[in-house]
Amino acid sequence: MALDAFLSKPNPKRHLGFRARFIARHGSVVQCAQEEALLQWVSADPQNRAPVIAREIDIFEKKKADTFGLDDASSEVELSPLASRLLALAPDKAPVLQGFNRHFHPSYWSGSLAQTLAPYQALSEKLANHADPVVAAWAQEALEVMRQRIEHDREMHIREEQSFE
């Protein structure tokens, strides 16, 4: 299966060029695969494969709220069905949640970091009430890290503005 070729190699750096070209042309290998194929692949070795897929998938899904507005503010962010199913398959949820972490830390953004992180915070707030204490603790920690990043970004922005005065 192609997932084995792309994701299960002992030395992923060896295949970095090929993988980078594939992603540039087609998008993420995982995003190109059918959900059922991904879950079947993970089911063969969920302890090791679930965290790998967690790093690769889109974990967010926007649901339109029951409002008449057309802006993003009227959208509600939820864990994607694939992310939910992956989490359910994982015998140990912590490595899967660590895989999800990369989505909560954008490396670049335009405008306010608080605004950029708003959907991530909304999802984390929902997951902080999750029935599984491992998921809830992870979400609470993610919220705290985002709050600290936002505060640090605000302080930097204030210092930059004061330096121009």
Image (cartoon, helix red, strand yellow):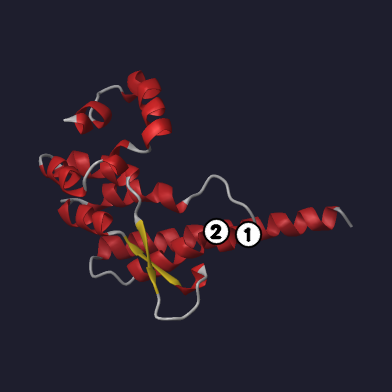
- Mark 2 closeness class: few <14, some 14–19, many ≥20 residues within 10 Å: some
**Residue shown at the point (32%, 72%) measured from the top left:** 129
Task: Reply above or below: 28 against 140.
Answer: above
Nearest the eye: 42 or 70:
70
Task: Reply above or below: 148 against 46.
Answer: below
The extreme right residue here reads 165
Nearest the eye: 127 or 26:
26
Q: In the shown orientation, is residue 6 left or right of residue 141?
A: left
**Residue shown at the point (23%, 65%) measured from the top left:** 132
Q: Quadrant of residue 162?
A: bottom right
Q: Which residue is mark 1?
A: 112
Q: Secondary structure at mark 1?
A: loop
Q: Which residue is mark 2?
A: 116
Task: Reply above or below: 94 against 122.
Answer: above
Q: In the shown orientation, is residue 147 left or right of residue 48?
A: right
The three-letter code of the residue at mark 2 reads Thr
**Residue shown at the point (39%, 50%) measured from the top left:** 101
**Residue shown at the point (29%, 40%) measured from the top left:** 32
Residue 96 x %, y %:
27, 49
Which of the image's four quarters has the N terminus? top left
Nearest the eye: 71 or 161:
71
- Whether the residues at callouts 2 and 1 have beta carbons within 8 Å, the answer is yes
Q: Secondary structure at mark 2?
A: helix
- Mark 1 closeness class: few <14, some 14–19, many ≥20 residues within 10 Å: few
Task: Reply above or below: 25 against 86.
Answer: above
